Amino acid sequence: MLGETSSTRAFIPEVTILNFWYVYALRSLVKKFVYVGSTNDIRRRMDEHANGLVQSTKAYLPLELAAYVAVPTERKARELEKYFKAGSGKAVLKKRILS
């Protein structure tokens, strides 16, 4: 790009939407239930949940996508998913994100 130097280019991430990982929260529309998961293909994963192909959520159908966060790597997604499933992370998710 015009006026771009190697030092400015270093701060621009070369990540496209196709490379993101997603941490998502689903909420049951019929029972008090929230599910947290992660995926690199959110549309495929939502279809799997909606069609009852996920053992953990099929008893709670129908579900809505309540929230999602895009992160650049699988490692970050797994760490965030683990955080949202445990103690203080679960509280943050319910109080700050899902409320």
Image: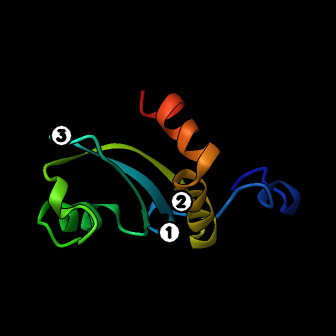
Image position, residue 14 (x, y; %): 63, 65
Compare residues 58 and 2 and report the one nearer the observer: 58
Above/below status of 96 relative to 88: above
| Residue shown at 17% from the left, 63% from the top | 58
- Quadrant location of the N terminus? bottom right
Q: CA distance from mark 2 to mark 1?
A: 18 Å
Residue bearing the label numbered 1: 19
Q: Quadrant of residue 32?
A: top left
Mark 2 surroundings within 10 Å by alpha-carbon count, few (fewer than 14), some (14 through 19), many (20 or more): many
Above/below status of 18 relative to 71: below
| Residue shown at 51% from the left, 40% from the top | 93
| Residue shown at 47% from the left, 57% from the top | 23
- First of labels 3, 2 by sequence position: 3
Disc 1 secondary structure class: helix
Going by the numbered disc 2, the residue's amino acid type is: Glu
Residue bearing the label numbered 3: 29
Q: CA distance from mark 3 to mark 1?
A: 30 Å
Q: Do the residues bearing badges 2 and 1 touch, measured as CB atoms within 8 Å?
A: no
Please identify the residue farthest to the right as the structure is shown. 7
Mark 1 surroundings within 10 Å by alpha-carbon count, few (fewer than 14), some (14 through 19), many (20 or more): some
Residue bearing the label numbered 2: 81
- Quadrant location of the C terminus? top left
Q: Do the residues bearing badges 3 and 2 touch, measured as CB atoms within 8 Å?
A: no
Going by the numbered disc 3, the residue's amino acid type is: Leu
Disc 3 secondary structure class: loop
